[in-house]
Amino acid sequence: MAIPFIINKVLLNKSVHIQRLLSNHHQMLDLLSMRRMWYQQTMFGWFQIKPMTSSRRVQDRSKNKRIHYLEIVKEKWKILSKVLFLMELLKKEKEMVIPLRSLDRYRKQLNLPKPHKITDFIRKCPNLFELYKDQRGTLWCGMTKGAEDLLEEEERLIEEQSTKAVEYVTRILMMSVDKRIQLDKIAHFRRDFGLPIEFRTKWVNQYPQHFRVEKSKDGVEFLELVNWDPAWAITELEKRTLGLNDGIGREPGILSLPFPLKFPPNYKKVYRHGGKIEHFQKRSYLSPYADARELKAGSLEFDKRAVAVMHELLSFTIEKRLVTDHLTHFRRELVMPQKLMRLLLKHFGIFYVSERGKRFSVFLTEAYEGSELIEKCPLVLWKEKVLSLIGYRGKKKEVPTFSDLSDMEERDIIEEKDIIEGDTEMEDTCADFEEEEIMGGLDAVSPTNDDELEISHFCNSYKGTSQT
């Protein structure tokens, strides 16, 4: 009796042990299932929350990927743009002078928000501007003889470069889908292409053999191509790489030319993606001057042609640099992607996007050696001359009255209503500089002392901050 009892007891214990194991096994399976479900939900949620392009946002870019010497170029332009705006503003006035209180209307374009004083800015450029009072005690701003000579020189240089400017405007129309572009959009490129202030009112009507102004039913003005010139249907890259001078006898079609690449010396991580870069460079693409209507948006061919179009546009500019807002205006006309910034950031070796300021700028990296343009046209040299005259070291000078000025020609006292009246050309000037308006930048290192302002100070200060 004892033996069967013992056997039953053992079997019962074993059965209980097996049931416990099975129970633990089921619990483990349930736990794994719950864990798997939680993991999938978490991963799905992560993909939903994380922005698709966060790794390519300009602000999230690592410091090692920034090209500091091109950032210095951007900072110099910020200083120069204020001076050029004021010079063009004074140029449009009847006697090239304006009451100081009238300049308050242009604080936005001058990037001088209150409580900054406009007089302080003018005093920091004594080689270009001067302040004086009339017999009624009204404070006026005018240009020095040197600044007036510089404006005359600029007019002469623009006239000399007009043939090239006509070619570039015509080639933009040739790249467009409908062979016409809204006139206001091209006006954004005025300074970048070296076009005169009266671009919309006079200049566009001087070359009827190339283009003409047409009005749509709703009154919008378009610049329309008149004559397709096969000699100009060739990219700047083809000219440099293949040594071609014109496109006569060649239909624009498929190209297989690699784009020049230039990376900052301290950026090494790019070589991990060497295979992708090599594959992109070998890929054929459609010429910017060929019809791109049939290209599928988002395809590899579509994106590479967009890179070619942007490369061509930047090659047309005198500084090989553009505000990115200007490029986005032409997405439909030039068949470029909606997310243009992503494409610019992706092809870092071809383009460089500077995020300093209120608006981003894109550079053609191959055109620069350090912070200097490799090839400088006369208009760029003129800008550098103006830049060299900005800044001074010394004490504030007393503002002379009109009767005390011995080095100025006698001028009639002009009624203020005649001085501040504007016209369409002046509105164009304001619009141009609103596009280039820059906030931020070197505010932390900018000198607050009214007694000195040197360009080198900004460059050295920027180098110091960029290394921290």
Image: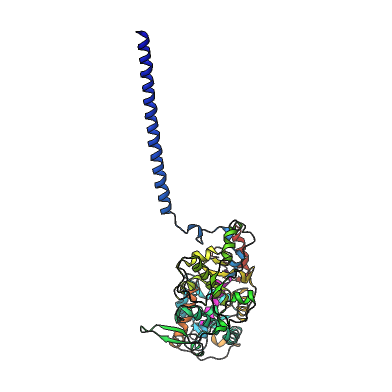
Residue shown at the point (39%, 30%) measured from the top left: 24
Residue 466 at x, y percent in the picture = 59, 60
Asked whether residue 405 is in view, the answer is no
Write down the quadrant of residue 220 in the picture: bottom left
Residue 370 at x, y percent in the picture = 64, 67
Depth check, front residue: 202 or 112: 202
Residue 260 at x, y percent in the picture = 61, 68
Write down the quadrant of residue 123 in the picture: bottom right
Q: Main secondary structure of the magenta part?
A: helix
Asked whether residue 250 is in view, the answer is yes
**Which image quarter is the C terminus in?**
bottom right
Residue 81 is one of the magenta-drawn residues: yes
Residue shown at the point (49%, 76%) measured from the top left: 433
Instruction: Establish if 108 lies above or below 4.
Output: below
Depth check, front residue: 173 or 447: 173
Residue 123 is one of the magenta-drawn residues: no
Give the extent of the magenta segment. 74-88
Instruction: Establish if 38 lies above or below 251.
Output: above
**Which image quarter is the N terminus in?**
top left
Residue 78 at x, y percent in the picture = 55, 71
